[in-house]
Amino acid sequence: MKSIYYLLFLTCFLFVGSCSKDDYNDPDNNGSSDNKPHVYICGHESVGTNKIAKYWKDGTEVILTDGTHDANAYAIFVDGKDVYVAGGESDGTHRVAKYWKNGVAVNLTDGKYDAIARDIFVSGKDVYVAGSVQDGKSSYYGGVYVAKYWKNGEAITLSDGNNDASARAILVSNNMVYTAGTVFEPTYSNNIAVYWVNKQVKQLLTPNSPNQGSGALDIAKTDNGNFIIAGSTHKGNTNLATYWKDEQQVNLTDGKVGTNLGSVYPSGADLYFAGWRYKSEGDYTMLANYWKNGTETVLNDGTKDAEAYSICVSNSVVHVVGWENGNYKREAQYWINGVAKRICKSQRWSEATDIVIK
């Protein structure tokens, strides 16, 4: 199981999943003049051998790429009438980090090395994007992944390049930039959950024994000014769903089965998290779930794998997106108070990666 765990850990923290990000908790955001709440969901869908990046507004899809090259959409942010989606698209050789504003692509990298954009945040007239870029120093692997964020297209390097690192979530508060992610140890057994305040790195868990590590996937700020970072820790081969409140670690699970948090959403005094866990000891079927103040709600019946990527709450209604296996492939899924709703009209492979209610 160790090799399976390490592969899953790397996949979760470097390439897969997303975080919820909307402007309910952003006092600097001007909001929309439309009083009717709208549901925005981003994701991707396979067409042939490539994936198409897209988003849905109230169920109506907006296609961002034409399927000529493989593309992903990982995060969505709505500012007034503007819709921003972060992700990446291959140019045929390398993956280019980019975002789309109202469907128009803005490239963040030149395609010389692989790169990906994982989260996006808009503050005033400034657009912030978190992601990672290979440094090109190794001809075989393409180099180490370096964590970065971009402000209005200008790259700011976060990690030192000694090990792979990912910047997975970003927010801006009081002109300070907060970015959460993971620094990967070479064997991926002692990964370190970190966050950066502007460019200063802070470790959330320092491994003190073999096969102990952690990773961070999302960050949010509560109305009371607390910073919440969601992710997981592990000691041995089992993930624990973990979050940090102002750097203080809280485990939501007991470690009997693998679990992981991919998204956090503060709503008043309540904390909501979305993620997954294995069904039981020895049964590695993945269950999509969410937690409210530590109480778990399972979203699928456990007959097939599922995962929850992103969560938000509006008028006490819990909205979660992710995927569930159907006919031996992933299908984008949207749960409203635990009731599943299909997003894609087709039967093709798809994922829903992030949700905003505006």
Image: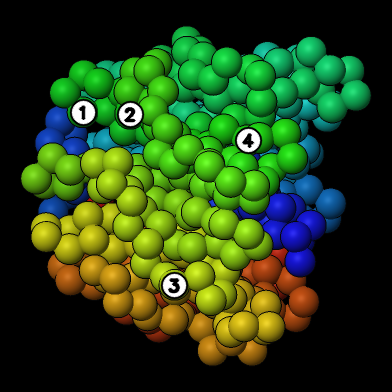
Tell me the crowding category of disc 2: few under 14, some 14 to 19, or many 20 or more residues within 10 angstroms, Cα based.
many
Mark closest to the chain's N terminus, 2 or 4: 2
**Residue at (65% x, 62% y) in the render:** 237
Looking at the rendered structure, the kind of residue marked 3 is Asp
Which one is nearer the viewer's eye here, 3 or 91?
Answer: 3
Q: Which residue is mark 1?
A: 173
Mark closest to the chain's N terminus, 3 or 4: 4
Place of residue 310 in the rendered image (x, y in percent of width and height, measured from the top left): 42, 58
Tell me the crowding category of disc 3: few under 14, some 14 to 19, or many 20 or more residues within 10 angstroms, Cα based.
few
Q: Which residue is mark 4?
A: 184
Q: Does 350 sit left or right of 158 as displayed? A: right
Give the label, 2 or 4, closer to the camera.
Answer: 4
How far separated are the C-alphas under marks 4 and 1?
27 Å
Place of residue 229 in the rendered image (x, y in percent of width and height, measured from the top left): 35, 46
Q: Secondary structure at mark 3?
A: loop
Q: Which mark is residue 254?
A: 3
Examine the image and state in which quarter residue 94 appears.
Answer: top right
Q: Secondary structure at mark 1?
A: strand
Mark closest to the chain's N terminus, 3 or 2: 2
